[in-house]
Amino acid sequence: MKAIKTILTLFSVMTIFLLAACSGNQEKAGDETKTTGEKSYTVEHAMGSTTIKGTPKKVVILTNEGTEALLALGVKPVGAVQSWLGDPWYEHISKDMDGVEVVGVESEVNVEKIASLKPDLIIGNKLRQEKVYDQLSAIAPTVFSETLRGDWKDNFKLYAKALNLEAKGTEVLSAYDKHVEDLKTKLGDKVNQEVSVVRFMAGKSRIYYTDSFSGVLFDQLGFKRAAQQEALFTPDNKLGLLALEVGKEVIPKMDADLLFYFTYAPPGDQAALDTAKEWTNDPLWKNLNAVKSGHVYEVSDATWNTSGGVLSANIMLDDLEKILLKK
């Protein structure tokens, strides 16, 4: 009888150990599953490489075109730099930015504000924020694009990778490319025209060229640039192939089959509006063939130039369809 009790006691002890071992293995398996769900990945960017754990949920974005990229990818940032135009956001994105904190402007970000948001990813730009990269990367994993030019697609792909949303990014770009091709087909022979793009600012005027936001899009559609502007743009001028500041004596070179212009006028900036009025009332401007034939179009500085992202690119395509196909 005593032997039987001893055997039963040993069996009970072994059972407890087995259950404990199973429980431990289950917890370990659960931990491994959790770890697997938070896999790390490394992103190569303008400042080196950054390792990011899991899919970021709290993102701070430090460029205007980057803000559009996040929204197009279905990501609402916790913080973003203020739009160059708007209070504080561009009109075309304001409804999607409700509750987003302003963290300065592209040229001067508020590092303390960014830190207070406790982000798990910061996306910025070397051209704009190189000096504060170390401070930002001490707050959270930080990824920087190299520069800001007309071809926003390279930056967009980087942002999608940083957000662990490359597949979604491919969808967005494919939809945009289809939008371009659809409009190109609708326009037909209309793309066989020369275009000129002009911007007015407070006391300044610029002609925009091939490496600008609108310039890249016009090139994708197959439009030609005004031939008489070729000599104005060289790789060593002040803004390269992006834009050139000009005086009124250059107004004749603004001519083209189609002339588009926009005005950068933040709230209260009457000087920019006055500059636009002065130039468009100048006899040289009124003598342009585009003006006399009624082929001059005023468009939005925000969506045709300043914001520079995928949402604006699609809006610009819609604008061109309305303007050139009279829709």
Image (spheres, helix red, strand yellow):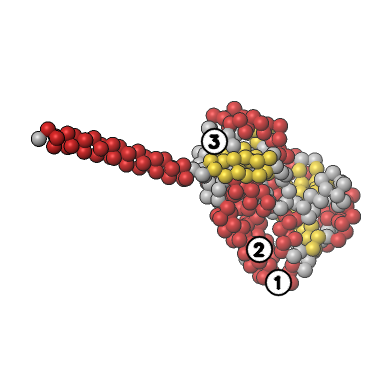
Q: Is residue 163 visible?
A: yes
The amino acid type, in three-letter code, at marker 2 is Val
Classify residue 40 by image quadrant. top right
Please tell me whether residue 268 is drawn above or below residue 149 in the rendered image.
above
Q: Nearer the viewer, residue 322 or 210?
A: 210
Distance of label 3 from label 2 (alpha carbons): 35 Å
Left or right: residue 272 compared with residue 76: right
- State the residue position of label 3: 119
Distance of label 1 from label 3 (alpha carbons): 47 Å
- State the residue position of label 1: 188
Looking at the picture, how far across and down is residue 260, in whole percent? 74, 56
Distance of label 1 from label 2 (alpha carbons): 12 Å
Q: Which mark identifies residue 180?
A: 2
The amino acid type, in three-letter code, at marker 3 is Pro
Looking at the picture, how far across and down is residue 142, in whole percent? 62, 38
- Name the quadrant of the C terminus: bottom right
Classify residue 103 by image quadrant. top right
Nearer the N terminus, badge 1 or badge 2?
2
Identify the residue shown where x is 80% and y is 49%. Answer: 243
Instruction: Bin the neighbour count of mark 3 within 10 Å (Cα to Cα): few under 14, some 14-19, many 20 and up.
Output: many
- Name the quadrant of the N terminus: top left
Secondary structure beneath disc 2? helix
Query: For the view shown, which residue lies furthest in the bottom direction?
Result: 189
Q: Is residue 85 visible?
A: no
